[in-house]
Image (cartoon, grey):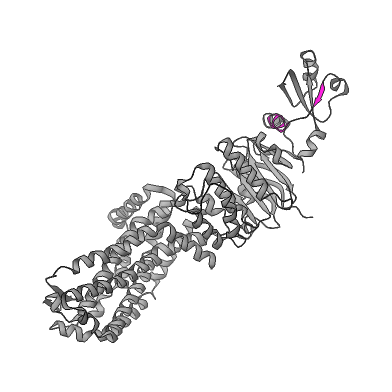
Amino acid sequence: MDPLIQAQGLRVRYGRKTALDDVSFSVPKGRVVGLLGHNGAGKTTLMKALVGLIEAEGRLNVLGLNPRRQRVQLLESLAYIPDVAILPGWATAAQLIELMSGLHPKFSAERARTLLRRTSVAVGDKVKNLSKGMVVQLHLALVAAIDAKLLVLDEPTLGLDVLSRKAFYEMLIDEWCDGERSVLISTHQVEEVEALLSDVLMLNEGKLVLAIPLADIEQRFTALGHDAAAADAMAAAHPLLRYRVQGGSAALFDGTPPPEVAALGQRLRPSLVDLFVALTRQPEINRTQGL
Amino acid sequence: MDRFFTLMKREWMQHRIGWLVVMAVPTVLMLVLSLFDVRGLKVKIDGDATVVSELYQLPVALQTVGWTFATGLLTFVLACLAVLAQLPGLARRDVQDRSIEFWRSLPTSHVQSVGATVLMHLLVLPGLALMAGVLGAQLVALVAISSHLGLGAWLTQPWWMLLPVVLVMTARMLLGLLLAVAWLSPLLLLTMAASAWLKRWAVPVVVATLVVGVEWLDRQLPLAVVKPVLDRMATEALNALLATHSFKGMHFDSPEGVTAALPDLPALLLRDAAQVLGNTASPAFVVALLVGAAGFGLLVLHRMRAE
């Protein structure tokens, strides 16, 4: 089965700065993929390239289309929330539904109204009178009413309070994730999306440093909890990251550590946050892996 | 096409209050004016004759045409001023309110998006305002004539003669609007494009560029270019709205003479329309369209790159 997104050797430059550097990955259908990276890592650039808003070198195929040349056609089957609270302030929810009905061939006004009833936004509400969290909910309700195959979300919860973020992710799970449609969600709030994801892509300084199904993380990476006496031995084994855990320290290895080192510690489940810290703070260990 | 129409509808949704005001204010002003005893009306056509008369002593049909022309013209002028005031801001409107990201996430081309904005604000909304003004004028005429001469006077007008006059006059002004915008498109669209890039500095920069062009560049060149080009654009745009030379040689001794000439007005306006259309068959018009298209292209380019 063809993947929904196939990227090969993507490269984007802004003047002398390389925003994306030889990025290759693919996203099959029915996946919830987290695109993780610090600010300036290249997440937004990658998303804009995916929806055809910027030109990228390399090969890029999204839903079987060339995003740059077939942007309009692509956006008919791809829903995209590019930022937080960017709906036009002058419009009411009802006007946005009316406009979306005319602009998007796969938009269902009825479904949008149904979804909206599950939020605290009324159809007559003007966007400029809504809180940031309500605007995001309205935007997600509009986007979830599109019969699209792929949803691309760029930092959709940035700046929202905990309750709004929770409401957003609940709505996303309930109304979008059906096992058929895929989601690519960029964020640096790693811990919040971990439970949602099936796969993860990590970007660091424009390079893809990790592309892996979440289920494979435990197989590939090893975290060892250890006491102070084993610290030197752990450090000598060159872990990706050494960090503090409840009651001691831990070391994170890419692969299996040497048996004599493994014997000194207790195996822990490596968390996505630790992996994120490990892979996005040490450029020298950047590496690219296929999904 | 549906999408383009929806994008045009979006312009109406966003700006409808302002445009409704533009459409209604002239009618309201004229309604207020119509309640007063307007002392006189001057009919002056190309300096050939001047007839002064008490307004309500004029033939009723002429009063109706007068109110229609005055209200329509006032609405049209107000609409043009609204367009000129709004135009620079339109180019950066979506970037300013950050909704550009939302609009660009929808399956519409950049050409469609910019095209709908330009078409609505340069042609459709001023055209609608003009038609609203003409319609409002009929209300003004009804109120004015009824209040001074009685409802019967309004009802017994020669409608067979008036309707073609009003319709052709409106159509002629709509054609004039289209052609005037086409002639002025280099200035209008390049100002919009400048506004997209230079933001609030755009208008001062455009004005300064034109002043430098007229006052300095033209003197440096063996043959002046900037001023003649601006003059030609302005002349053609004004002629497109009303080619006054079409009315040269007309002479009226009395208001009744003007009324008697009214049935000929549609044919005269049609001839005038043919003449201004004929003026477009010139290299200058093609150049104007090409430069206007370049301005449009710059707007599309800016939208493609908008952050």
A110 to the left or right of A251: left
Viewer can see residue B224: no
The quadrant of the rendering that contains the C terminus of chain A is: top right
Q: Is residue A265 magenta-colored?
A: yes
Magenta-colored span: A264-277
Q: How many marks?
A: 0
Question: Does residue A35 sit above or below A100 in this rendering?
Answer: above
Horizontal and vertical percent for residue B205? 35, 50
Question: Does residue A88 sit above or below A35 in this rendering?
Answer: below
Question: Which is nearer the eye, B59 or A1?
Answer: B59
The extreme right residue here reads A259
B146 to the left or right of A170: left
Question: Which is nearer the eye, B113 or A79?
Answer: A79
Viewer can see residue A285: yes
* Residue A13: quarter of image: top right
Horizontal and vertical percent for residue B119? 43, 64
* Residue B26: quarter of image: bottom left
